[in-house]
Amino acid sequence: MRKLAVLTGGGDCPGLNAVIRAVVKAAYHHKIEVLGIRDGFRGAVEGEFMPLGLSDVSGILPRGGTILGTTNRDNPFAYEMKLNGLTQVVDRSDDVLRNLRERGVDALLAIGGDGSLNIALKLADKGLKVIGIPKTIDNDLMATDQTFGFQTAVDTAQDALDRLHTTAESHHRVMILEVMGRYAGWIALYAGVAGGADVILIPEIPYNIDRVALAIQQRANQGKKFSIIVVAEGAKPLGGEMVVERLVSGRFDPLKLGGIGAKLGNDLEEQCGMETRVTVLGHLQRGGSPDAYDRVLSSRYGVAAVEAALDGEFGVMVALHGRDIVRVPLIQAVDRLKLVPLNDPLLLAARELGIEMGD
Amino acid sequence: MRKLAVLTGGGDCPGLNAVIRAVVKAAYHHKIEVLGIRDGFRGAVEGEFMPLGLSDVSGILPRGGTILGTTNRDNPFAYEMKLNGLTQVVDRSDDVLRNLRERGVDALLAIGGDGSLNIALKLADKGLKVIGIPKTIDNDLMATDQTFGFQTAVDTAQDALDRLHTTAESHHRVMILEVMGRYAGWIALYAGVAGGADVILIPEIPYNIDRVALAIQQRANQGKKFSIIVVAEGAKPLGGEMVVERLVSGRFDPLKLGGIGAKLGNDLEEQCGMETRVTVLGHLQRGGSPDAYDRVLSSRYGVAAVEAALDGEFGVMVALHGRDIVRVPLIQAVDRLKLVPLNDPLLLAARELGIEMGD
Amino acid sequence: MRKLAVLTGGGDCPGLNAVIRAVVKAAYHHKIEVLGIRDGFRGAVEGEFMPLGLSDVSGILPRGGTILGTTNRDNPFAYEMKLNGLTQVVDRSDDVLRNLRERGVDALLAIGGDGSLNIALKLADKGLKVIGIPKTIDNDLMATDQTFGFQTAVDTAQDALDRLHTTAESHHRVMILEVMGRYAGWIALYAGVAGGADVILIPEIPYNIDRVALAIQQRANQGKKFSIIVVAEGAKPLGGEMVVERLVSGRFDPLKLGGIGAKLGNDLEEQCGMETRVTVLGHLQRGGSPDAYDRVLSSRYGVAAVEAALDGEFGVMVALHGRDIVRVPLIQAVDRLKLVPLNDPLLLAARELGIEMGD
Amino acid sequence: MRKLAVLTGGGDCPGLNAVIRAVVKAAYHHKIEVLGIRDGFRGAVEGEFMPLGLSDVSGILPRGGTILGTTNRDNPFAYEMKLNGLTQVVDRSDDVLRNLRERGVDALLAIGGDGSLNIALKLADKGLKVIGIPKTIDNDLMATDQTFGFQTAVDTAQDALDRLHTTAESHHRVMILEVMGRYAGWIALYAGVAGGADVILIPEIPYNIDRVALAIQQRANQGKKFSIIVVAEGAKPLGGEMVVERLVSGRFDPLKLGGIGAKLGNDLEEQCGMETRVTVLGHLQRGGSPDAYDRVLSSRYGVAAVEAALDGEFGVMVALHGRDIVRVPLIQAVDRLKLVPLNDPLLLAARELGIEMGD
């Protein structure tokens, strides 16, 4: 093991730089060279590399984003290119292998979520030595207890709930916070408990609007003339058609044009007659400095990935199991998404706290 | 001077509790009683009062919201009531005067923005002894250098810009943050400078979309493949019809259904071909703990209002002039809104920093 | 199970209020009454109780401290009393049992660390139905993966390191941060990794001052003219006499009069000739709003304690094992302190990151 | 005006990078070159310069510290040098002038406090074109309403007070926070009001320990079994000898070895019998990201300094007067320190709030 390459793929996530720094520091410790690949798999295809030494990663631990750049589109197996003025989709995975081979790279560390790790797995199938590092603020990746970036996203959402709380109470309003989570409700669940939400709606539990309205009404009857609702962007009403599809026009993020939060607010105003306000947290969840938890987790992942490379164990992802970092087959990570199970201990605790889950 | 009443009117604003606390503490110091009025002018009409002693304001300095409650609707001069099943609008200003008189209140301290202070002024015209305290996150109140709540709103917007910055840079994107400011661009201007925005668009300067696109293009030409734009909710394109009116349906806040930020994002994607993302900060700007600056300013306003009462000077608003708190006639405060003048020193400095203002 | 009592014992810790709130909410859910005991075991001896309903815990989730009050001195088994003008130490544990019995309390939930849980265990031996909830910012309690309050303390220490970092770098200095941890180095280890420390010194690994000086020297040789050191208050030099004992005079916290941080700074200035500055974080680690992680953990502990009571399982402590909350015999928790083992995975990772541990 | 040089002198201060960035951006706008000088006046003497372009200042706005480095010792007029193995003090101010002249620098922008601006003034007397920019967290510089860095230091101290508050209240303790301010009590005064302190002790008002004890006692009598005290490091008891001198040994910062905070704590424990805890905030006040207020102020100062250079106005300092940035003769700034006057409006307001000032 003499040379590693590292790339960051997919959407922004707090802790990317912390992983890169840990990879470089641990590699330095073991006298291994590191090459950074620019802009995720695009740089791997196009051959854009940069050497990464200690001075390149100095001071980046607290910074959001990634010094390597990233995209959440370019897939070497279906790479968009302009050929003769036309956009074509081409398999350029061989270019990735060739670029790495030509630079003497022994193994690739791919920091990414579902999408990037799937690509990594397919490259592994073609013979590349690959190690995955689990990244997503949504925490919906299988085979690891937690991805880095999630805890910081929860902090951000909880901070937003703290802010909305005082306004809700002073103005006797229903305040709705729409958080990320297209398929899995982890951010909504954790931030909702941490932020003292009265109602938490997640994609895994289609919600009954009458139950939600009843919970708000019961609070009002107890003299609590306000309520706080956290709703995951992927939550949906029982049997209901999705508002998101209806409103989306063009390339914009559906959230911005009024997603489930807006629909929920409208429906509740009609049913409860209480003033309702909706805030869509959006990209604020992806940026900013990683919190201490994520800096530790990211650093551990980076170190563990280098160790796996040293041990010659490839086609795996480093993963958190309890208090340990272990290695799991990449295939397990990308097999399917990790949804909130109905017997999740925090979900059950939320119910005991009297939080309405919409069912 | 033996008894003061205090109320908080209008939208939520960091520092309301700090003012209430300062009023009660300064009044205690001068052996004056304080009555709190619940829910702004609604409580003044309906006669809902609560005595406020030192123990009632203990620990509230850092808390957002108002322990008195507030509304931004009820106007004693045009008070909505259900009479015989019909909603009627009635002048109940006499009830306010009677309620205060019956409880032996010598003067009313009204903490509020444009709307609440206008009501206070009309009550003063009817003979009530009134002192105003300038509150609005928008900082668009005349006759004072700064309202409390503004600096904290700027902090919140700046923090959001910091978060968006790393994502923009890592993903080579244009990130747009829509902040409050229907008529005045103060939050956008201050947060934009503090957050290192490349473009700031405010209601006072109708923007030329071509100028904005050019600024982004020029950055790209210099190798900066990302840009940060702050846009006040009330900003508008040169000669353009406003998207806000077009999209609003029903009672929801226009911001939530895609205001100027969404339009701007759409237009820029078309013109520049760069990926654009919009975040609407919304109510997050109104809540949360006031920062040190606003806690000091709020405390000074509260003390100064009690002093004005002691001096028997009514029909005035306490105001910040330079480093001093002075008293100005209420009429000056509500005469018209304080917009960003084209020769505002920070606006001129922003231009020197190379920030594109859209004109 | 009809009535529970709850008390908070020992030093301040972020999350106390979150546990109390969860206990009350979960008890309400199961139609159980809750009595709060004032000021830890003092109130249990003196019979100072207060009923706790939903309204008493409304809004306390984000607040530091404890609404019940606490002391870290009063032990019912060795209770200091003034009798005939003399201070005597008396066993008043029977008063605790009687007070609880007279109020119809079925079981006691004791939120505390080592000391309080030891008392709880001895009360259990006398027949009291007791359930412990593990609290300490130091995280040095056996039988649980993590205590609540620890993560927030780590956040605080990491934030301090971030601040010191820029000063160290700009001024070419060695900055030392002394954090809590008399016996165990958990805060130093986690905050040190999260804050990018170059040296971490913990009580479990007596440090060789020459190794520390060498690490700083090597950085200087690489052009890094600054270093960041985190030292736990209980760290000690190899074979060295402890400075703390020497400096302490009277009742003051040793930290304040110059503990190990000051000694280390002095020694390093002599050995390296670099300017060194010491900051003692002290009580800032104990206060403030709990972070999202601790709010979730505290809430889960509170719910789990009520569930244990409902299941009739006493003499236990609720504990985090991996992702689950389990019940462990109280005796396991107070048997001995949980120190950082030499094969702790984060300790090993820290070494791989090139962090000097002083050995 | 074709080329400017800029340096940062003295202790660390949030906003240094923001000023540098603004200087470079405004200079770019006016097609002026900028040279950065490394490590304050040391680099000016030694001739260590670096060109500063837009890319050098990209992303530094939110960062603490200074990319130029700084020292708070090197004075060109009394420069320490090793000559023949002996340390000698030499006047090397001519080297500064020569170095700047040789590089074609038209004027020097000196960002610093009292010390650095004094040096700048003496260089101006020798014919150098100099413009000063007022930096100090202590805010004790004459001729400007506010220095940059002060507001952020107040934020940090206020945050510490918020943390100590909950512990004080839960544990019925007196918590003392020692903040910076050797000669002037600005940080203590502003942070004390913002953090809800019960007692504020500043250097300008020698304190009577009996008054402080009485204030704490009166609170206890009202059922407030805790108190919060902010003390500036330079505060001193009436007629008392200073503890600082007594305890200092060697090169360490006196604060760290128990300064006025420790003495005060000891004295109060003896007089009141209440448990007292002392926290010394120290260097945490100097580091970290500048807040929005300081980023705006720093940016304005940077722009204004470039404008002054363009206008050919030298020997001046840019200063905040009310809402405007003006130019004042450098001599006014360094004439003497700006202490808190006894009729300072915030000091008077603090008294009205019932805060004990110790006199």
Image (spheres, coloured by chain):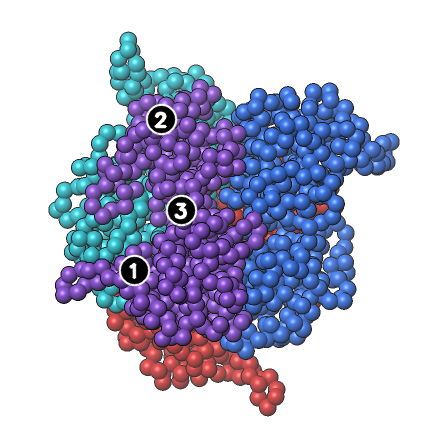
Chain colours: A red, B blue, C cyan, D purple
* Vertical side of B24 occupied by C14: above or below: below
Q: Chain of mark 1?
A: D
Q: Nearer the viewer, residue A167 or B21?
A: B21
Residue marked by disc 2? D209
Q: Which residue type carries mark 1?
A: Phe
- Label 1, label 2: how far apart the Cα atoms are: 43 Å
Coordinates of residue D292 in the picture (x, y in percent): 52, 53
Q: Earlier in the sequence, mark 2 or mark 3?
A: 2
Residue marked by disc 3? D336
Q: Chain of mark 2?
A: D
Give the number of callouts. 3
Q: Which residue type carries mark 2?
A: Ile
Disc ID at residue D77: 1
For image coordinates 47% across by 21% down, the residue present is D222
For image coordinates 55% across by 83% down, the residue present is A81
10 Å neighbourhood of mark 1: few (<14), some, or many (≥20)?
some
Q: In the image, which is nearer the foreground, mark 2 or mark 3?
A: 3
Name the side, left or right, on which D208 lies relative to C199.
Answer: right
* Vertical side of A155 occupied by C29: above or below: above
